[in-house]
Image (tube, helix red, strand yellow):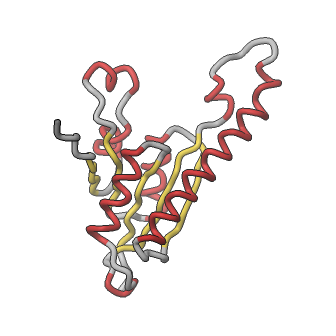
């Protein structure tokens, strides 16, 4: 019987890495035959033009440097995800970097892999920040064609 696919979306935030840790701890076993899911970890890399966000004299000169930095950051994010999986003895993992808006990338990855579950972390933004920045988890909860699990990092107790 074919295993279901679980997609975990990650970025460079501690919230997304917490969600990955939590997911591995609760759904994956060191023995692949006992894990109920195939695991796909995806990182959305913005395009250099989107990251720069300006069009004007000299902006074309900056794009190659920004693109290089974005690739390095994506590589670091995937390397950290790989280290977390290795530490949890989960080795059967597909790692992907896809260029684009995280909301679209996650929903498209779900479709491409026919995933049954999407896991995302929650940054815990308040209403104003969420309204300005938009919430990736909220968008995915409404648009992904699968179950969406939003993992919240517990707040530190004072």
User: Taking 7 as reference, is 124 left or right?
Assistant: left
Where is 12 relative to 88, above or below? above
Residue 78 position in % (x across, y down)? 56, 56
Figure quadrant of the C terminus: top left
Q: Residue at the top extreme?
A: 57
| Nearer to us in this view, 39 or 113 | 39
**Outermost residue, front side:** 158
The image position of residue 95, as x and y in percent, is: 54, 63
Tell me if residue 156 comes above or below residue 92 in the rendering: above
Quarter-of-image position of residue 123: top left
Q: Which residue in the rendered view is the most extreme toward the left?
A: 158
In this rendered view, identify the residue nearer to me: 1 or 37.
Answer: 37
At 42% from the left edge and 57% from the top edge, which residue is drawn? 110
The x and y percentages for residue 59 are 76, 20
Q: Is residue 19 above or below residue 5?
A: above
Residue at 41% x, 57% y is: 8
Please provide percent x and percent y for residue 155.
Answer: 22, 40
Residue in the picture at 62% in, 29% down = 50
The residue located at (43%, 77%) in the rendering is: 89
Q: Nearer the viewer, residue 80 or 33?
A: 80
Q: Number of marks in the image?
A: 0
Image quadrant holding the N terminus, namely bottom left
Q: Is residue 34 left or right of residue 54?
A: left
Front-most of residues 53 and 69: 69
């Amino acid at each position: 019987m074919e295993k279901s696919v679980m997609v975990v979306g990650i970025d460079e935030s501690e919230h997304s890495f917490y969600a990955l840790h939590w997911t591995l701890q609760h759904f994956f076993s060191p023995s692949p035959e006992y894990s109920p899911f195939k695991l796909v970890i995806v990182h959305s890399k913005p395009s250099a033009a989107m990251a720069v966000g300006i069009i004007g004299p000299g902006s074309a000169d900056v794009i190659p440097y920004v693109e290089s930095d974005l690739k390095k950051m994506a590589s670091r994010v995937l390397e950290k995800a790989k280290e977390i999986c290795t530490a949890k003895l989960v080795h059967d993992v597909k790692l992907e970097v896809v260029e684009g808006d995280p909301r679209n990338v996650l929903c498209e990855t779900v479709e491409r892999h026919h995933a049954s579950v999407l896991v995302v972390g929650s940054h815990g933004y308040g209403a104003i920040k969420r309204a300005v920045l938009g919430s990736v988890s909220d968008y995915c909860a409404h648009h992904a064609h699968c179950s969406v699990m939003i993992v919240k990092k517990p707040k530190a107790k004072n």
